[in-house]
């Protein structure tokens, strides 16, 4: 019997599709091909033009299911959950993956309960098991100390969230063809118990450390709040954002949204700078999947050097200024 | 206003040691503690109680020893607690856990608010909070960073999302999962601990909580763990010492060359 | 006092002994060996740093130093607070970073044999799961060397119940100031076979010989610990309680640590710890341990009740590592936090009979007013051993500061004498306090010390300029 569709949840903000939507398509593509089935992108939105939706098709979606309604303009889990559940009942997908964003990590659990199926959070790897065709979902646990592979043998759809930026967005192929299916929004699915009544942009620019290519993090080694200026300076030069260890956040040197680690955020940037961070499991859990890791610490025994691709053992108050200087010089060349 | 706080007892993982051979966690000497992220929910619950009155009840699903976590929460200021325990629960995934806890919470009866930590530091899924809300069909807000107001059945909260803070108005009863920003956990007091010591913590079983055996434990869980492995952490990168002017200069040059080579600048 | 220079010829002799790569003569690299945690004005550059691997090498170096009349200063982790490891007369620094092996864990005899370069906290790491532990607990245990603990007879946070380093040293191997290798004591609990020379060496600040091997007694690890963090409305009510805890409860806690408001405030701000210190004038951190949870809880209750009867505002309790660590990190970070508040300062180590600490603390507050400086006090109240830390007034010049420091210290030490105390309880005299030694030590006593020193170190090459000055007999 042919397998049913592989679905990915597209996300949009301010009427534009978010990058993660395309990352999910490159994940989904592999799975759909292996299962010889169709890849479908699902979008719940206030409204979006076919032209914009075409991007999903150019990036590999065979079908795009769109539900439009003012009620879906902003994310409220109850209404979105109702709509998704309705779609799932109607089209019975085989696999359904979403990004492990605040939206995905809220909506998917809510839906999986009602769809009476399993969900695996924050996966770093997705594969199809030979023979059974089951989805093998690999995720880190216990602070990244173990990798667990999980499957959902009997329940459908098999649901998973995957870390943003854990894969490259699917490339654009102008020749890709696909169908846009606009599914009518049923008014009885709107749930008015929760209303979004405002949004406050984080003044602190570059707060979204999870979507940055370069993260420069500071820790206890900075000794005081003021010294985070050194980190900001370096981050600016590398066109990156500022991260921090739990020590630094706990000491109130920088706000919680900057915290990388077990009790903070997991980041997978192209380049991660750990400055004055010893590298407790707590922290490593949040950054050790970065492509390239650079560590600067005065303690040669510091754990952080174990995960570093490049390390400097030295006083950060000497290293950073001279590094910034050198970068300046390189740029001016 | 009555508040329910599900808490999880987790191994103290901030300095966890792994057995390289077996790929399992070395548990001896590792303490079981309240999931550190649940402490923010507990603190928030106690603050809301201090402001609006009512009772704060913690519930923990796990081995009988989970009573320790419940009692510590009471030592911080929670009024009572329940341990949901029994071999039938063993092997429950997030779906089954959400189900079991939601049934127990129904059983508790009258409450207005459920507060959860963002996620547990061991499983690290963050799915049980939303799962409970889904089973109970109550309002849900995740990643809540502040509770601004509660007034005749309506509450206003802010949630931390990518790029900013979203303000929600929600009807009670509701479930919130809270982030660290929302509060700073207080320490347990001696008076609280003494009170907790003499307060009996009821143990609820599958039957006393009216839970369907077939929907919990391994059999009730849609997901199966098929493999556990320990990732190799070490990358064995180049390490340079910056002891003096000269070695500092060299290290920095090497670093910049490295970044250029990697096309990162 | 005239010593000879470390000439290139001597450097090459040294490298014959330890190997070329274990000698440092580069100014830049040597600078880290020129100071410890005492203020910069006490720092002094060595002429050469040698990093030997074994006692025999050290014996050779010492013989050489005697021949050539060159001072030798042994150095551990460099966390000292009296300048004990500073080469005040230049010469050779002997650093122990390579002699850092745990040689033997003897479970049957409940002891451990270590080299001096072992980091103190490593000892208990090596004992994990054995049910045994080494009870020494200096606040710098994560970076100090056990050799330094022996040289300074380090105390720390658990001394009320477990005593100080000397209590656990049952055997030593040393290189004498004239270069012989001698074994003192052994794997023995009791030993009065002649003078107790090992205890003479303990706390001698590296002036009577160089320790090269240490036999430490281990203790059974208590299974349960409870910490109480007690907030009091003022200093007096907190301090007054200290002796009562032991007398009225009949309990010997592991620790009774005192922290005044300024220490706590500064540290909480530094750690962003939200303890409600604002309404508290002072805090006590009290730890009790034992093997039965009920018993330990009962002790904690008893002490807690006594605190409430004595104007305690609140008693917090920590009975797991996570909470306990949260409380202790406040205590352990006071030094660091105060240093950031005021880099120019002097932290003291006064010790008085425990019944006298109330008066002591109140007098310190007066001295602070008198000289218009801040003197946060904290420390091991249960031992009568506090660390008043004199902070430079930001508006004053360095000259004014040095003048104030001198005067204030004389007042403080005078106070110690009056109360029957001493000027240092666990940090040592070193070079930092030697000019004040005579305030609390009689001429006759100092003479005894000098005679011992001269008898064992005729050329006065072993860490000269520490404790007292001496004129070279040769």
Image (tube, grey):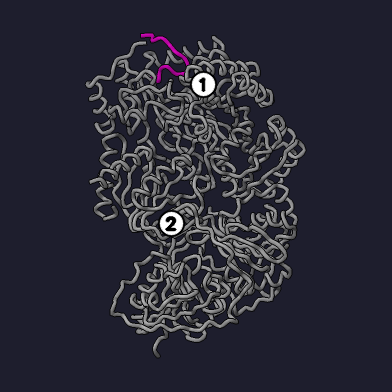
- Which chain is disc 2 placed on? A
Is B244 one of the magenta-colored residues? Answer: no
For this view, does A193 lie left or right of residue C338? right
Q: Residue at x 63, y 31 (%)?
A: C381
For this view, does A250 lie left or right of residue C71? right
Residue C198 visible in the displayed image: no
Q: What range is drawn magenta here?
A: C462-474
Q: CA distance from mark 1 to mark 2?
A: 44 Å
Q: Position of residue B170 (x, y in %)?
A: 64, 67
Q: Residues within 10 Å of mark 2 (few under 14, many from 20)?
A: many
- Which chain is disc 1 placed on? C
* Residue at numbered disc 2: A209
Is C469 one of the magenta-colored residues? Answer: yes
Q: Position of residue B166 (x, y in %)?
A: 55, 62
Mark linked to residue C396: 1
Name the foreground residue: C263 vs A80. A80
Residue B137 visible in the displayed image: yes
Quadrant (top left, top right, bottom left, bottom right) of the N terminus of chain C = top left
For this view, does A327 lie left or right of residue C96? left
Q: Position of residue B213 (x, y in %)?
A: 62, 78
**SS for tag 1?**
loop
Name the foreground residue: A170 vs C28. A170
Extreme residue in the right direction:
C309
Q: Residue at x 35, y 37 (%)?
A: A318
Question: How many marks overall?
Answer: 2
């Amino acid at each position: 019997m042919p397998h049913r569709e592989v679905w990915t949840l597209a996300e949009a903000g301010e009427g534009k599709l978010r990058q993660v939507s395309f990352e999910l398509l490159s994940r989904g593509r592999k799975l759909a091909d292996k299962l010889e089935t169709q890849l479908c992108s699902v979008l719940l939105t206030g409204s979006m033009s076919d032209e914009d939706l075409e991007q999903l098709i150019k990036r590999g979606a065979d079908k795009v299911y769109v539900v439009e309604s003012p009620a879906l303009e902003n994310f409220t889990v109850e209404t979105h959950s109702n709509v998704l559940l309705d779609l799932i009942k109607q089209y019975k997908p085989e696999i359904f993956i979403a990004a492990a964003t605040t939206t995905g990590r809220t909506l998917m659990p809510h839906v999986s309960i009602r769809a009476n199926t399993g969900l695996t959070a924050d996966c770093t790897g997705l594969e199809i098991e030979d023979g059974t065709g089951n989805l093998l979902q690999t995720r880190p646990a216990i602070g990244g100390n173990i990798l667990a592979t999980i499957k959902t043998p009997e329940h459908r759809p098999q649901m998973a969230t995957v870390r943003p930026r854990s894969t490259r967005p699917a490339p654009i192929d102008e020749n890709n063809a696909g169908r846009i299916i606009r599914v009518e929004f049923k008014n009885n699915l709107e749930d008015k118990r929760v209303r979004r009544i405002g949004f406050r942009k984080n003044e602190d620019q570059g707060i979204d450390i999870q979507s940055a290519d370069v993260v420069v993090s500071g820790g206890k080694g900075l000794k005081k709040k003021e010294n985070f200026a050194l980190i900001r300076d370096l981050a600016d030069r590398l066109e990156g954002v500022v991260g921090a260890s739990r020590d630094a956040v706990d000491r109130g040197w920088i706000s919680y949204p900057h915290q990388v680690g077990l009790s903070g955020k997991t980041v997978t940037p192209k380049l991660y700078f750990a400055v004055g961070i010893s590298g407790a499991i707590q922290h490593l859990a949040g950054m050790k999947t970065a492509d390239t890791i650079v560590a600067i610490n005065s303690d040669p025994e510091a754990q952080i050097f174990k995960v570093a691709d490049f390390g400097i053992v030295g006083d950060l108050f000497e290293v950073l200024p001279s590094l910034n200087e050198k970068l300046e010089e390189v740029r001016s060349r | 206003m009555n508040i329910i706080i599900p808490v999880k007892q987790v191994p103290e993982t901030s300095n966890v040691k792994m057995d390289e051979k077996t790929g399992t966690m070395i548990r001896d000497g590792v303490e079981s503690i309240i999931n550190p992220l649940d402490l923010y929910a507990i603190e928030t619950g106690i603050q809301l109680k201090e402001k609006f009155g009512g009772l704060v009840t913690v519930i923990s699903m796990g081995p009988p020893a989970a009573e320790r976590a419940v009692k510590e929460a009471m030592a911080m200021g929670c009024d009572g607690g329940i341990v949901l325990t029994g071999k039938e629960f063993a092997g429950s995934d997030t779906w089954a856990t959400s189900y079991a806890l939601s049934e127990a919470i129904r059983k508790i009866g009258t409450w207005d608010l459920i507060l959860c930590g963002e996620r547990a530091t061991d499983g690290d899924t963050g799915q049980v909070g939303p799962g409970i809300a889904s089973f109970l069909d109550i309002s849900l807000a995740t990643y809540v960073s502040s509770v601004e107001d509660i007034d005749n059945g309506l509450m206003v909260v802010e949630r931390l999302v990518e790029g900013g803070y979203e303000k929600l108005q929600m009807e009670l009863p509701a479930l919130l999962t809270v982030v660290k920003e929302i509060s700073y956990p207080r320490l347990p007091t001696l008076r609280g601990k003494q009170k907790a010591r003499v307060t009996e913590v009821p143990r609820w079983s599958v039957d006393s909580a009216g839970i369907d055996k077939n929907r919990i434990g391994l059999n009730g869980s849609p997901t199966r763990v098929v493999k556990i492995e320990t990732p190799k952490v070490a990358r064995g990168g180049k390490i340079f010492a910056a002891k003096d002017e000269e070695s500092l200069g060299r290290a920095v040059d090497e670093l910049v060359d490295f970044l250029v080579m990697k096309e990162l600048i | 006092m005239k010593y000879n220079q470390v000439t290139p010829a001597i450097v090459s002799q040294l490298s014959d002994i330890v190997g070329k790569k274990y000698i440092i003569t580069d100014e830049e690299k040597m600078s880290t060996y020129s100071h410890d945690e005492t203020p910069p004005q006490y720092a002094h550059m060595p002429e050469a740093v040698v990093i030997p691997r074994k006692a025999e090498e050290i014996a050779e170096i010492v013989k050489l130093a005697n021949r050539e009349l060159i001072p030798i200063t042994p150095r551990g982790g460099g966390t000292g607070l009296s300048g004990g490891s500073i080469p005040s007369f230049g010469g050779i620094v002997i650093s122990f970073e390579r002699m850092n092996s745990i040689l033997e864990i003897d479970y049957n005899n409940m002891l451990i044999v270590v080299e001096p370069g072992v980091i103190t906290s490593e000892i208990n790491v090596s004992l994990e799961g054995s049910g045994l532990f080494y009870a020494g607990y200096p606040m710098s245990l994560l970076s100090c060397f056990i050799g330094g603990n022996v040289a300074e007879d380090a105390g720390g946070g658990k001394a009320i119940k477990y005593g100080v380093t000397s209590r656990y040293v049952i055997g030593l191997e040393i290189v004498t100031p004239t270069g012989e290798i001698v074994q003192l004591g052994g794997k023995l609990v009791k030993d009065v076979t002649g003078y107790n020379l090992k205890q003479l060496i303990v706390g001698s600040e590296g002036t009577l010989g160089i320790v090269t091997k240490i036999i430490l007694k281990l203790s059974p690890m208590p299974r349960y610990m409870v910490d109480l963090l007690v907030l009091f409305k003022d200093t007096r009510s907190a301090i007054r309680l200290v002796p009562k805890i032991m007398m009225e409860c009949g309990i010997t806690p592991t620790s009774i640590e005192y922290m005044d408001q300024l220490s706590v405030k500064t540290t909480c701000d530094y750690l962003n710890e939200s303890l409600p210190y604002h309404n508290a004038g002072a805090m006590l951190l009290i730890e009790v341990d034992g093997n039965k949870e009920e018993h330990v809880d009962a002790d904690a209750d008893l002490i807690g009740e006594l605190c409430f009867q004595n104007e305690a505002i609140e008693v917090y309790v920590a009975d797991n590592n996570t909470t306990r660590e949260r409380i202790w990190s406040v205590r352990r970070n006071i030094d660091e936090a105060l240093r950031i508040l005021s880099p120019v300062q002097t932290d003291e180590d006064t010790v008085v009979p425990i019944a006298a600490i109330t008066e002591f603390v109140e007098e310190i507050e007066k001295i602070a007013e008198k000289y218009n400086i801040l003197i946060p006090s904290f420390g091991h109240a249960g031992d009568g051993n506090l660390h008043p830390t004199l902070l430079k007034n930001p508006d004053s010049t360095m000259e004014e500061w040095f003048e104030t420091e001198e005067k204030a210290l004389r007042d403080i030490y005078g106070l110690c004498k009056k109360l029957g105390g001493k000027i240092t309880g666990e940090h040592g005299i070193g070079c930092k306090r030697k000019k004040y030694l005579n305030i609390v030590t009689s001429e006759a006593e100092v003479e005894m010390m000098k005679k011992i020193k001269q008898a064992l170190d005729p050329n006065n090459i072993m860490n000269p300029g520490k404790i007292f000055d001496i004129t070279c007999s040769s």
